[in-house]
Amino acid sequence: MTEQRPHRATVPDRPSLDGLEAVWAARWDVDGTYRFDRSKTRDEVYSIDTPPPTVSGSLHVGHVFSYTHTDTLARYQRMRGREVFYPMGWDDNGLPTERRVQNHFGVRCDPSLPYDPAFTPPAEPDPKRPARVSRRNFTELCERLTAEDEKAFEELWRHLGLSVDWSLTYATIDAASRAASQRAFLRNLARGEAYLAEGPTLWDVTFGTAVAQAELEDREWPGAFHRIRFGGAPGTAHEDGVFIETTRPELIPACVALVAHPDDERYRPLFGRTVTTPIFGVPVPVVAHRLAEPGKGSGIAMICTFGDVTDVVWWRELDLPTRPVIGWDGRLLPEPPDGVPAGPYAELAGKTAHSARERVVQMLRESGDLDGEPRKISRPVKFYEKGDRPLEIVTTRQWYIRNGGRDAALREALVERGRELEWHPPHMRVRYENWVQGLAGDWLISRQRFFGVPIPVWYPLDSEGRPIHESPIAADERSLPVDPASDAPPGYAEEQRGKPFGFAADPDVMDTWATSSLSPQTVSGWERDADLFARVFPMDLRPQAHEIIRTWLFASVVRAHLENGVLPWRHAAISGWILDPDRKKMSKSKGNVVTPMALLQEYGSDAVRYWAAGGRPGTDTAFDTGQIKVGRRLAIKILNASKFVLGLGEAPAEPRERHALDASMLARLAAVTEEATAAFEAYDYTRALEAAERFFWEFCDDYLELVKARAYGDDEGAASARAALRTALDVLLRLFAPFLPFVTEEVWSWWRPGSVHRAGWPSPAELGTLPGDPGVLATVSEVLREVRKAKSSARLSMRAEVARLSVAGASVALVRPAQDDLCAAGAVEEFVLRHDEDGDLRVEVTLAQAASA
């Protein structure tokens, strides 16, 4: 860090919050206030794995909410003397970016097209007729747009006052991230943790890509139950037919079996027998499985390849054949599966699932196999979290990384990793464990998209030019990052691409989580900067939202466990969601988001940060401009109170005599400092703010009013007051600094050198060696409030005189040392104290105007 500039040493006549963000953001940048000093040892460093926000448009107030939480923790650790490693990343690959680029430029990627170095996007994009571009042209547009978005994001983060080191930015598509992602994958592959498999895959037909379990969400979707008759089994109670109920009759040609529960007496005679499918007449066995539900529908169901995830389980565990009919585009395949007659199937070939369903229902009516009319229902259906249409299950070849979904020992090891982690709040660990223990398969990491980190493998081609997928050719780590679509594999020349006995590139890219899950390693310089890696990894903190525990947090634990044999960080601080006034989560897809820049400009960044810091760890919080206004009022009060305190003039750091009221205030502040420190150590920034704010308003409303008259004097009492006021201001600025960085830095510059954000966090020992009784200030303040109440009730000015003030009770001894301050603050003419050993504090106020009347 560069040497700090000297302080201003002047108090402005009219202090204001306006423009502080621009002034101090620039000053911090020039001074290197938050620059990471990499000469520090690991014990001296506090490293933060900052979430890289998705660069696909604009940030919303929910981002401001959670990133402020992280920043308060970073600022606290810095003031505690730790050297804070606080980088910022941009998550700029994946579907959100592709969708934004498609809409913004009016283009669609067509990998079969050659690269056009002269391509320019349409001047007036037409979403109905997008321009087709090569993959390379498309990724160039992605890079162009994300670069613009990243500048806007950085501007907003600087305006908010995030104390990151802006020389440490990274992007999930940059060379370092690509190399780290590909290196980790190659090592997973070498150890047998990454593997290629062909099988049923959850598929989004709109985006044309596979979807992982962690990216699913259930949505209610309209449908209908169809009661359908299958051909019967002679010699049984079902020789006239077996009735099933299904919402997907279009999958009858994909049926491979009927299934019932092994204990269902109705269907036991059918187990081991065959029945025939309606319309197509294909024989299918009747089998037993524990997942069949006797109370659902007719109690017997058809197993199709594939209608839903339960079909996949049945198919796998019962070792059934495959009859796929749904293609990657969501339409029924042009040719029937083996064993299905082509005649009836021709009625369905090429239709969408919806159109095929309508035609099958019509055919069932004609054949007499539809019993009654379809019964409309609404049911939960699997969607890709960013998709608009229900997912299909198609057969594809995909890359997976083992994550415990099919390995009990690995699953238990990952559960134990979660127990090693310090969770804030602690109950969030349950979400992690529930997710890990509920995994149904390994992590599918390949995606059939364009703007992402390429899978770093090729396949040798046989004599007919077909890929030999069982023998992938891995990239050399020394060549990373690579793009198999344009780079040749080791031992081959580019001229052999696509030719018999040559090679072909793996066409897929990695899921964005496969890159961002390595953010701890990437930012720490893994295999790139050994010195930095030793100083910051494993990291100290992962801050993130609760809904991506199953994705980002878990995936990061998996990668560090497999590659480094450790947790990637010691602490996880979980933020909640921001809710709109109707208590619904804010999201771009719902159209209920609030963009933050206008808020920051209207109320000031400190005010918005104040509102954000009021959201407790892990708790969803409603957006509330009322709380933002409270934050602005607090920031203005800090300016005005500081101006008053500093305007009283210099004071000794430790006066010869400490007035009882001053000592009491400092003792109270010492307790607040302990409380705030304990809260921050527990990662409870909200409680730390509450403690400081509660005391500050008491300090302004009560203590300042009580000592104001005395502080203007020139005796020991005045020196004690001014010294206490300055000491308290010094401590309060530091207590507020993590939350309100701009106003605290502004006031600090009026009278202190350097930056408040590099000043030490306050400790009780700083508040004087002379003991004080916190009860003095509390009791005297209670009396003062009664005086104010009496004046307010009489609708008099607070400067109105009090003819007589009588205080009685067991605690009057606490009032006596401050009686002069109390009389001055309350304009009291006669003050009477009466000790009552058994009585509570009683205050009687006789106003001068009331007495004269």
Image (cartoon, grey):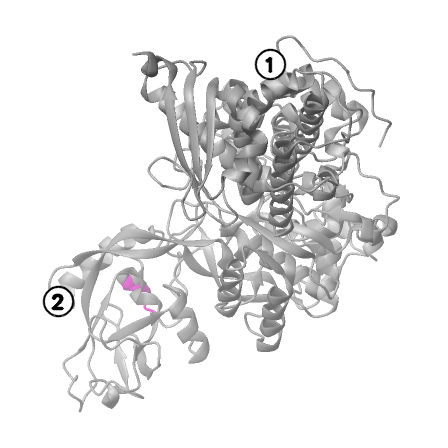
Q: Amino acid at mark 1?
A: Ser
- For the residue labelled by badge 1, is the local secondary structure a helix, a strand or a loop? loop
N-terminal of the pair, mark 2 or mark 1, is 1
Q: Residue furthest left?
A: 372
Q: Which residues are magenta?
A: 340-344
Q: Residue at x 71, y 19 (%)?
A: 715
Quarter holding residue 686: top right
Q: Are marks 2 and 1 in contact (CB under 8 Å)?
A: no
Q: Amino acid at mark 2?
A: Asp
**273 shown above or below 771:** below
Q: Position of residue 438 (x, y in %)?
A: 48, 68
Residue 16: mark? 1
Q: Residue at x 35, y 13 (%)?
A: 849
- For the residue labelled by badge 2, is the local secondary structure a helix, a strand or a loop? loop
Q: 23 and 248: which one is in front? A: 23
Q: Is residue 158 magenta?
A: no
